[in-house]
Image (tube, helix red, strand yellow):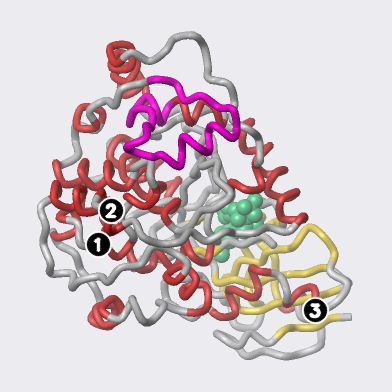
Amino acid sequence: MFSRMPITVGLGLIADGIAILAYKLIKEVGDGTFGTVWRAINKQSGEVVAIKKMKRKYYSWEECVNLREVKSLRRMNHPNIVKLKEVIRENDMLYLVFEYMECNLYQIMKDKSKGFSESEIRNWYRAPEVLLQSSIYDAAVDMWAMGAIMAELFTLCPLFPGSSEADEIYKICSVIGNPNENSWAEGLQLADVLKYQFPQCSAVQLEVLIPSASKEAVNLIKALCSWDPCRRPKATEALQHPFFQTCLRIHPSFHSRLAGLSHTPPVGNKGALAQNGTRRYSTGPLSVTRSANNFISAKANGSLRAGVQRKLEMNEKEVEKNGRSLGNNLRQSRYKPPARNNTGYLALKSQKIVDVPSKMPCTKIADKLSHMSLDSGIQKAGKPPPPHETPGRRIVTTRVEIALMSWMILGKNVRVVAGD
Ligand SMILES: Nc1ncnc2c1ncn2[C@@H]1O[C@H](COP(=O)(O)OP(=O)(O)OP(=O)(O)O)[C@@H](O)[C@H]1O
């Protein structure tokens, strides 16, 4: 009736017994697509944990251990990735016991009255939404997201605050200009297939949109938010950007990992995927300093474009699930508020669009943007037609990869959240 699964990383616990009763549930702290999360206390040790009670029933252990969340987290053993401490199945209900994370980035942002400083931005980071309509994509989608998040951390306002998929593309075009043969030929082909027409917009000056950002920061955001995924820097390349050359603190062990990245994945199979399936070229030592402009032109160079994109295939269930969550998401705008305080917790989710906190001073940017957009000649004939809706295909790289990437970049706590 009760059983516990051995967690090879972390606690090696196998036991049958009244496992869940070993915990006292204190309070519900969150609700996800697949489970409800409770703050709980281990009655024996007094340790505070987070228990995720899965919403559906699990009739066998096999089902439980095959969950991607469980499989991935069992392999993870890193101080910056939340630990799955225990898995308990009781009366066909599944409970995942995690270390408890006190804080999330949303709360921190909400509590701040002005943007983060650059040094803070170098260190803090929230999982993004990436709205790409391609069936083949890779970790570059996360780099796009990183650019958007960077901008948002400066302004406390989404860079591309789309209220729907079509609106999102419209907003992107409004900021970085519509793509053309030169900037993203594949994108045009893709749009063609979808019978979608990009709105015709000129790029606005990011320096004006994000006045508090340094030249280097703006340059990096531009590079990250390139239409063409091949032109976006990879995580390791981003680390070489001048923006990160100031007060970049990297653990010595990370240097050696980084040096060996072209041969050795950061950790686990997913890490290998993230590195292998994508455009790969060797990363120099972190001390390499380039000018911000050289950085962008280097990425634009054709020699960096070689590579294959990994097709992330999703099974029917995933498509259905993601479609459902996307449907819900599209009814919202941005920022979903999970609420906790303190530092050190980072919920990285690639599939979530969340609500705009009303407190955020977005009007300024919106104003600027609307003026600039008008001057830049955005077509005013209403919203562009929505691109073909294939939500299941839009889900970006796996959360494990995101966590790995974030770990590489930030060395900060990352919660890997994988619902199925
Ligand atoms: N280890 C944890 N410590 C503290 N709070 C947590 C922890 N894990 C999850 N939570 C809280 O519970 C919420 C729900 O988490 P859960 O993993 O079930 O779903 P999610 O990943 O946020 O959403 P979805 O599954 O829909 O993508 C989180 O947003 C967070 O607020």
Q: Which residue is mark 3?
A: 62
| Marks 1,2: beta carbons within 8 A | no
Residue 74 lies, with reference to residue 329, above or below; the image says: below
Q: Is mark 1 within 8 Å of ligand 1?
A: no
Residues at marks 2 and 3, CA–CA distance in whole angstroms: 47 Å
Considering the whole magenta stretch, tell me its main secondary structure. Answer: helix
Q: Does the stretch in magenta take in 196?
A: yes
Q: Is residue 378 left or right of residue 190?
A: left
Label 3 crowd (10 A; few <14 / some 14-19 / many >=20)? few
Q: Is mark 2 within 8 Å of ligand 1?
A: no
- For mark 2, give the secondary structure: helix
**Which numbered disc, 2 or 3, marks the residue closer to the eye?**
2
Point out which mark residue 302 bears.
Answer: 2
Residue segment shown in magenta: 171-200
Mark 2 residue type: Gly
Residue 293, image x, y percentages: 14, 46
